[in-house]
């Protein structure tokens, strides 16, 4: 089924070609929602943008477009307003038929992608021997949402966790642990992640202050890189212990991801340098092997170098990312690679992508995309920290969200004189608490910083997860109260009579366009905004229109509208990684 908006856009484009010839094929009809519903549902503003090109007045251009429009089955007669706006109003019968088609479709009218793309989503990426903190929140949940959306559309998605599991820090940590806690690198689970973090801090201080320790640490890195048995075993134990802790967080957040750390690409690094040299891109600069970048300058105004191999022969993040690009596009045959990191890494990826492009390592038709995001800030407007000034651990943040959700729930249960089981309270508190954290993040434009506020994200009103969940619960309450089996309503017609029914229906028919936009532009907040507006429009409809007390056939039609709203909310929230609840 062609989406409602795509259908309208296609017909306008056909009319443009019919009116003015094939030169206008593919012209954007500039279709936007009207500011005032009394003028219609959408307006096409293309006549204004064509005036100079066609050497005619916009209103005359609009008249010719309308004369060539075929919309009898779709819209009321188009109206030309002002200097040349073409106002369009959907026919009620058309909306009813479209809605009925969506209602009987398990995918709610969202078509699968054609063509299907092999896509890699690189997200989360914590560091071994460190705890996941609030800085990992955005990458993890934005990445999960993007992966879910692409998978729902039928794309072939590989979710990769590019963990920091290689480099100097391991030589440093292994050397320190041999001195202070040797069992940590010989016995599995002998220390927890908190201890490892503390040992890491101690090791870093020794590395900075003690030249002998620094030398020994670097020798340990050489041992690790050469595959020396004890060093390799120590490294594997550290990775295993960290991996267990990461998985606890991923389980709570319902994240599915495959680990492929920096160590995976280590055997490929020599060839990166060798091949860049053979392409005459590699030059020596202060003992290091570098590629001088185009469009990037240092503080002296000279071309900035991207270091591929350090003066001591070691490699760095850029080399690893170059190796990853080649492996992902050649071995994995990825057509789209999406990197989800903080905005501070935008320059790094622009530079790495440039070098890969100049080396012709990005095949034709392959798209590398950096998806940047802003900071999570505290209510003081500064980077979110604990009272002691440390970075907030992700585990602590999620614990606090669930605790606060439970407190709010207990208050409501007491006020409503309800009797609920401990299992119910735990299930609802967890779903609301974790869902609120996710939604609060995903509902922001990802490129912006945002203020983290438990009070705002757990509110039952406003653009929050609880508001969305409550709209879903409201429909389930209708089902319970009226003893309604929604699966048995499918044969009845959908009738749109009240203005609030029409408003809700039009919004329901925008789901496919919204999901496609998220997949294309990678902004989850557009889906959140759609779901928020859907919940608002549903609540307005529910407040205006009787459902269970309505006469037939209106009663069944309104029940179908309620059911379709709930199914749309459930699907949309699932793409955000948020499960629905039957009761709250």
Image (cartoon, rainbow, N blue to C red):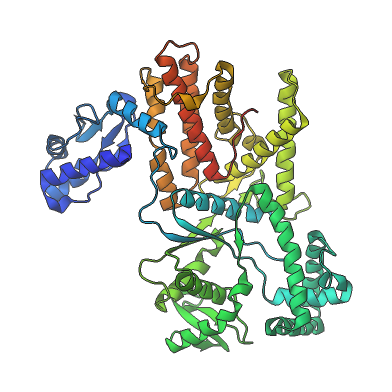
From the top left corner, tell me how far across and down residue 377 is, in percent.
63, 49
Question: Which quarter of the rendered picture does the C terminus lie within?
Answer: top right
Q: Residue at x 52, y 44 (%)?
A: 575
Percent of width and height locating residue 193: 78, 60
Image coordinates of residue 339 in percent, x first then y, are 52, 61
Judge from the rendering whether residue 289 lies leftward or rightward of residue 229; answer left or right: left
Q: Foreground residue, 295 or 263?
A: 263
Count of marks, rendered view: 0
Residue drawn at x 39%, y 38% is: 109
Q: In the picture shown, does residue 412 fall above or below 302?
A: above
Query: Residue at the location (40% across, 42% down)?
Result: 110
For residue 91, side relative to residue 182 (left or right): left
Is 547 placed above or below 42 here? above
Which residue occupies the foreground of this view, 227 or 386? 227
106 in relation to 327, above or below: above
**Can the viewer see residue 129?**
no
**Relative to residue 558, is residue 180 depicted above or below?**
below
- Report x, y in % for residue 5: 31, 39
> Could you say which quadrant of the image residue 560 lies in?
top left
Q: Quadrant of the N terminus?
A: top left
Residue 304 visible = yes
Specify the quadrant of the image occupied by residue 62.
Answer: top left
> Of 415 and 557, which appears nearest the observer?
557
The residue at the point 65 percent across, 40 percent down is 453
């Amino acid at each position: 089924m062609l989406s409602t908006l795509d259908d309208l856009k296609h017909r306008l484009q056909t009319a443009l070609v019919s009116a003015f010839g094939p030169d206008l094929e593919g012209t954007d009809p500039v279709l936007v929602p009207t500011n005032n519903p009394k003028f219609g549902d959408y307006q096409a503003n293309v006549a204004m943008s064509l005036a100079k090109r066609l050497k005619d007045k916009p209103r005359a251009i609009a008249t010719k477009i309308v004369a060539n429009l075929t919309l009898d089955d779709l819209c009321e007669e188009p109206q030309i307003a002002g200097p040349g706006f073409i106002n369009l109003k959907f026919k009620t019968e058309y909306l009813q038929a479209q809605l009925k088609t969506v209602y009987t479709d398990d995918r709610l009218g969202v078509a699968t992608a054609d063509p299907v793309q092999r896509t890699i989503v690189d997200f989360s990426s914590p560091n071994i021997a460190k705890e996941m903190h609030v800085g990992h929140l955005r990458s993890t949940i934005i990445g999960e949402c993007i992966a879910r959306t692409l998978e729902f559309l039928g794309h072939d998605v590989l979710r990769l966790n590019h963990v920091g599991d290689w480099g100097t820090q391991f030589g440093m940590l292994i050397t320190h642990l041999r001195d202070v806690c040797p069992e940590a690198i010989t016995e599995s689970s002998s220390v927890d992640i908190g201890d490892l973090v503390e040992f890491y801090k101690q090791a870093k201080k020794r590395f900075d202050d003690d030249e002998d320790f620094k030398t020994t640490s670097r020798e340990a890195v050489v041992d690790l890189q050469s595959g020396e048995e004890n060093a390799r075993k120590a490294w594997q134990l550290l990775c295993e212990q960290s991996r267990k802790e990461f998985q606890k967080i991923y389980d709570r957040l319902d994240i599915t991801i495959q680990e492929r750390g920096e160590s995976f690409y280590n055997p490929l690094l020599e060839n990166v340098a060798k091949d860049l040299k053979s392409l005459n891109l590699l030059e020596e600069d202060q003992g290091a092997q570098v590629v001088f970048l185009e469009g990037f300058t240092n503080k002296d105004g000279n071309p900035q170098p991207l270091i591929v191999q350090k003066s001591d022969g070691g490699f760095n993040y850029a080399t690893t990312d170059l190796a990853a690009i080649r492996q992902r596009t050649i071995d994995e045959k990825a057509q789209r690679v999406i990197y989800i990191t903080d905005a501070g890494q935008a320059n790094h990826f622009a530079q790495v992508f440039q070098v890969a492009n100049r080396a012709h390592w990005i095949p034709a038709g392959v798209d590398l995309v950096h998806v940047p995001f802003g900071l999570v800030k505290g209510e003081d407007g500064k980077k979110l920290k604990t009272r002691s000034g440390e970075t907030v651990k992700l585990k602590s943040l999620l614990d606090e969200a669930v605790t606060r959700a439970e407190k709010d729930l207990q208050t409501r249960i007491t006020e409503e004189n309800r009797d609920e089981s401990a299992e119910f309270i735990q299930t609802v508190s967890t779903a609301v608490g974790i869902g609120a954290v996710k939604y609060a993040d995903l509902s922001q434009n990802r490129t912006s910083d945002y203020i983290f506020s438990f009070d705002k994200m757990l509110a039952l009103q406003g653009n929050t997860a609880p508001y969305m969940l409550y709209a879903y619960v409201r429909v389930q309450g209708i089902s319970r109260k009226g003893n309604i089996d929604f699966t048995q309503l499918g044969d009845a017609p959908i009738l749109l009579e009240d203005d609030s029914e029409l408003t809700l229906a039009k919004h329901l028919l925008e789901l496919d366009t919204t999901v496609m936009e998220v997949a294309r532009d990678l902004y989850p907040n557009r889906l959140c905004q759609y779901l928020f507006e859907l919940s608002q429009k549903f609540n307005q409809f529910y407040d205006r229109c009787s459902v269970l007390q309505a006469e037939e056939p209106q009663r069944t039609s309104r029940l179908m509208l309620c059911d379709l709203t709930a199914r749309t909310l459930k699907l949309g929230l699932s793409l955000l990684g948020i499960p629905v609840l039957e009761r709250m």
